[in-house]
Image (cartoon, rainbow, N blue to C red):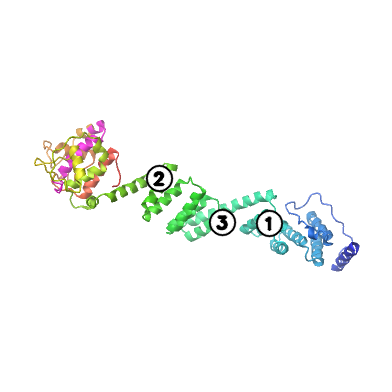
Amino acid sequence: MRTLAVSSLVLVLAAAGACAPRTIAVPVVTAPKFPEFVRPEVPAALAGSDAVFMYDRGWRFLQAGDFRSAERDLALTLRTTPTFYPAEAASGYVALAQSDGNMALTHFDRALARQPDYTSALVGKGQALLALNREPEAIAAFESALAANPTLVDLRRRIEVLRFRNVERGLAAAREAARTGRRDDAIRAYTDAIASSPESAFLYRELAVVEREAGDAEAALTYFRKALELDPGDAGSHAQIAELLEARGDAAGALAAYSASLAIEANATVAGKRDALVARGELAKLPESYRAIDTAPQVTRGDLAALIGVRLGQLLQAMPMRDPAVITDARTHWAENWIIAVARAGVMESYENHTFQPGSAVRRIDLAQALSPLLAGAASSPLLKKWQSARVTVADLAPDHLAFPAASLAVASGVLALDPDGLFQPSRTVTGQEAVEAIQKLAVIAGLADRR
């Protein structure tokens, strides 16, 4: 029966073309022309088929470089036995060898329609897709082949190279789109790059930045958090999350994120933002009267005591304390504690009638006299001597005036300034903004600057 079947196959071959030779020498292939092609394996269910003989001839002709003979034998195999899918896969490789990616893809798909996990056809399909510049699909085909046959170590390396190359190209396109302001294109390009390399934390981080610039804070938060899942040591993503949370009013979450970032990496900018957030939180706890000082048209003695107590508290505590005289009008004032503190430090004193008069307006000369002992405590000895010996000319304050040394020290240190005409204006009342700026400058000198 087998002899009869082979004879029938030869007769069909003879009928296929009158010009075909009756006897064709089968090549002995010692050096395959296409060693990268995966020979289609004949499964056990088809091993007894009469088509095996002609299929084997076709594959040998392919590896010998005789495409015409390979095509003829494989086509004859499929005409006589249409279900013999190894010949279909082999035909795909013949088309691939002749740089016909579309025809190769057709043959591989036909083979896979009969056997979806057929390794040879999956590898060949990936190669055909590469030839057609369809890399993402090629990677998917190669991955399917590797899943079907994990022993294909070389294929695993090839997938890694393709993924890297694909991500590299996609990343370049994404960054260029982001640089030129084409945010929608950048988002699409980053999304494609992530699909090729889902474990790359930096891709999520860069996509999050684009989403944030596009105004989608929620998407940005999602991607920054994904970046942190993959790379918990990403200080930059912690800082970005902190800024986003702070912008939407989640002070506690923002503070935790700023702290997490700084625990990983020291950064002066991030530290400044955290400190500012802390300062705003502390400011929110202070009385409304305190928060209104910076916009007040004039500062009172109680306001000034509070400013000094809050912003220069550490400096006050370092100064020699004394038992202040009895103050009769501080008990019911909102700044009572700070009034007592500045009085004990000798920065602001009560009057002879034992009143502090916290509601009285502060004049420029009053402010200079309050700043004088604070500057003495904040500055180094050489710096303080330099300021004290400076020859400051004040057009409206005589050198023998009792308050001149305080005014001169305040001007020499840069905490207070003269007007364009060289006037100190000692009797002019101080505005809230002016008082805040003076205290802030002194805080910088003392190394206690903050934003409260």
How far across and down, in percent of the image, does residue 82 sit? 78, 66
Q: Earlier in the sequence, mark 3 or mark 1?
A: 1
305 and 184: which is toward the camera:
305
Residue behind mark 2: 259
Above/below status of 194 relative to 389: below
Q: Earlier in the sequence, mark 1 or mark 2?
A: 1
Mark 3 vs mark 1, CA separation in Å: 20 Å
Label 3 amino acid? Answer: Ala
Residue behind mark 3: 195
Magenta residues, dominant SS class: helix
Mark 1 vs mark 2, CA separation in Å: 50 Å
Above/below status of 309 relative to 118: above
- Tell me where residue 98 sits by quadrant: bottom right
| Image: magenta residue range | 357-384
Query: How crowded is the residue under tag 2: few (<14 C-alpha within 10 Å), some, or many (20+)?
Result: some
Q: Is residue 354 magenta?
A: no
The residue positioned farthest toward the front in the image shown: 331
Q: Earlier in the sequence, mark 2 or mark 3?
A: 3
Who's the residue at 47% across and 52% down the image?
225
Q: Is residue 358 magenta?
A: yes
261 and 93: which is toward the camera:
261
Give left or right: position of 38 versus 206: right
Give the structural element (helix, strand or loop) at label 2.
helix
Q: Which mark is residue 127?
A: 1
